[in-house]
Image: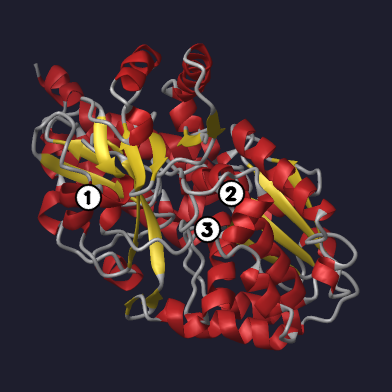
């Protein structure tokens, strides 16, 4: 009887040697005349343990990691096919502390199923959400999403049900569903992990969205740097089409929904929904004026629902288990769970899906294990390159949209980048403003010119004496206010957040930065 072994095909695991490990396991088994069933699954999200190999045993999956090609022979010698002891043994996968206390709803299948197998997907509650949706009319599906409290997970946290209802109520002969998969925020990778590890979930979620609002065509606007996700999505779309879950007769319902992947233009600004639409139409990615809203006048001028990967991939579990089941997770207006990504100077980088309400300290210290260097945490940037820098003194803030807004921060896409006490926060502030200057689409003056002038002011501030720094700080704060109030989109409107938070919480770095000290001497 063959033994099933799981080796991740996730891009991060592959970058750490998973492909060579999988090849060596197959070769070693052949040399020993052992029959194996080698499954290339998605990553469980414990990136400090990748490549993490799992062996299916009567007691459950047993994990080993991080495994390199040179370790394979010794694993066979130790009897790892029966869960044998080895220096790399981690015990039962489900008992690993990092995983055990998570509440995985959106990521329930990631790392468990074979992302290329529709049968495996169906065996793990796949397409149950679609089957439930097909028993309802469009308005009832939209109401279920509204009742669940699901908000957009791409950054803005706008209630998904309101967006869907607007599109549902719009009168048009053609409507579209667009998935924003142009995941460009620093420290984020949940979209990529899900698309590579459970692509059918996204396909199912978009299909439900299409049926709900009356859209017959969907597009996944995929980040250009995600070739592994592209292969996974295209394979899933082809399989779903062949099996009748996409096309002219979705699951025998008579409903029509087709889906295609489109590669992004490689610009950060195309993560903004109207710039994305411009790019998808073959134009230069620039922000559109709003109104009209995309839900009324979107892709090719037609009503369009635009949500990000995690938002759409969460839809199947809501329809499958009910809006109340999902709403029971979380706190306040932040309902359900959020896949949080730990990155930067952190001992245990990885993905944590938990209900809203836990603290930033729990995430960074309990799950992340503190800094990789062992030095004290000084700051965390939450929400991507436009997110505020949160000082260690505020680590007890709850992971909740409103709680973060109250301290001048944002959750965004759920990425957390950790810094220890050696970081120069003045340099980080300059980087944030320079990022905006480089990535600006150029359409509005506050963003295009303001960010460029902002970099110049920060440079003068760090190079001047005390009086010069004070004068330039006033100018910088005034410039930030102009950008926040006058920019057309969140790029210019939020780029000041990391700058202002660095000034407010780490002012001493602007007074004692290497550049300022060099000028003073």
Determine which residue is flagged by label 2.
271
Q: Nearer the viewer, residue 461 or 382?
A: 382
Of the image marks 3 and 2, the number of the one nearer the N terminus = 2
Check the image and report above or below for 14 versus 466.
above
Residue 155, horizontal then vertical, whole percent: 47, 59
Q: CA distance from mark 2 to mark 1?
A: 34 Å
Q: Nearer the viewer, residue 460 or 105?
A: 105
Check the image and report above or below for 114 versus 455.
below
Mark 3 or 1, which is nearer the eye? 1
Q: Please state, as top left, top right, bottom left or bottom right, where the C terminus lies in the image.
A: top left
Q: CA distance from mark 3 to mark 2?
A: 14 Å
Q: CA distance from mark 3 to mark 1?
A: 24 Å
Check the image and report above or below for 85 versus 230.
above
Q: Nearer the viewer, residue 228 or 427?
A: 228
Of the image marks 2 and 1, the number of the one nearer the N terminus = 1
Residue 345, horizontal then vertical, whole percent: 23, 34
Determine which residue is flagged by label 1.
97
Q: Tell me the tag on residue 310.
A: 3
Q: Is residue 378 left or right of residue 342?
A: left
């Amino acid at each position: 009887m063959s033994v099933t072994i799981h080796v991740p095909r996730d891009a991060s695991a592959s970058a750490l040697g998973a492909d060579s490990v999988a090849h060596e396991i197959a070769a070693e088994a052949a040399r020993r005349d052992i029959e194996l069933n080698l499954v290339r699954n998605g990553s469980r999200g414990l990136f400090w343990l990748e490549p993490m190999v799992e062996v299916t045993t009567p007691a459950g999956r047993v994990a080993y990691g991080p495994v390199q090609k040179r370790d394979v022979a010794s694993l066979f010698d130790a009897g790892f096919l029966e869960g044998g002891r080895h220096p790399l043994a981690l015990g039962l996968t489900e008992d690993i502390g990092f995983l055990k206390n998570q509440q995985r709803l959106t990521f329930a299948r990631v790392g468990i199923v074979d992302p290329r197998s529709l049968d495996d997907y169906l065996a793990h509650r796949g397409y149950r959400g679609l089957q439930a949706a097909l028993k309802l009319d469009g308005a009832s599906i939209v109401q279920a999403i509204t009742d669940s409290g699901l908000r957009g997970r791409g950054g803005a946290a706008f209630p998904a049900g309101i967006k869907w209802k607007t599109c549902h109520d719009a009168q048009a002969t053609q409507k579209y569903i667009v998935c924003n998969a142009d995941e460009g925020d620093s420290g984020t990778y949940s979209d990529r992990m899900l698309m590579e590890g459970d692509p059918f979930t996204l396909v199912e979620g978009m299909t439900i969205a299409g049926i709900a609002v009356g859209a017959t065509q969907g597009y996944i606007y995929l980040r250009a740097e995600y070739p592994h996700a592209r292969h996974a999505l295209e394979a899933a779309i082809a399989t779903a089409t062949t099996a009748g879950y996409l096309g002219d007769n979705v699951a025998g319902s008579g409903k029509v929904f087709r889906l295609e992947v489109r590669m992004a233009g490689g610009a950060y600004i195309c993560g903004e929904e109207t710039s994305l639409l411009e790019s998808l139409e073959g134009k230069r990615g620039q922000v559109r004026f709003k109104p009209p809203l995309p839900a009324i006048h979107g892709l090719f001028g037609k009503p369009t629902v635009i949500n990000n990967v995690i938002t759409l991939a969460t839809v199947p579990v809501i329809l499958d288990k009910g809006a109340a089941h999902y709403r029971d997770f979380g706190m306040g207006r932040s309902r359900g769970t959020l896949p949080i990504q730990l990155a930067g100077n952190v001992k245990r980088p990885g993905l944590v899906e938990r209900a809203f309400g836990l603290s930033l300290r729990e995430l960074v210290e309990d799950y992340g294990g503190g800094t990789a260097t062992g030095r004290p945490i000084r700051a965390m940037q939450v929400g991507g390159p436009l997110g505020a820098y949160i000082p260690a003194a505020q680590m007890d803030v709850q992971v909740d949209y409103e709680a973060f807004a109250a301290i001048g921060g944002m959750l965004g896409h759920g990425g957390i980048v950790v810094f220890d006490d050696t970081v120069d926060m003045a340099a980080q502030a300059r980087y944030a403003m320079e990022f905006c200057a480089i990535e600006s689409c150029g359409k509005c003056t506050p963003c295009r010119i303001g960010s460029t002038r902002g970099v110049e002011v920060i440079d003068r501030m760090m190079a001047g004496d005390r009086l010069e720094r004070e004068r330039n700080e006033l100018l910088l704060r005034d410039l930030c206010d102009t950008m926040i109030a006058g920019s057309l989109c969140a790029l210019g409107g939020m780029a000041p957040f990391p700058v202002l938070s660095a000034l407010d919480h780490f002012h001493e770095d602007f007074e004692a930065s290497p550049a300022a000290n060099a000028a003073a001497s």
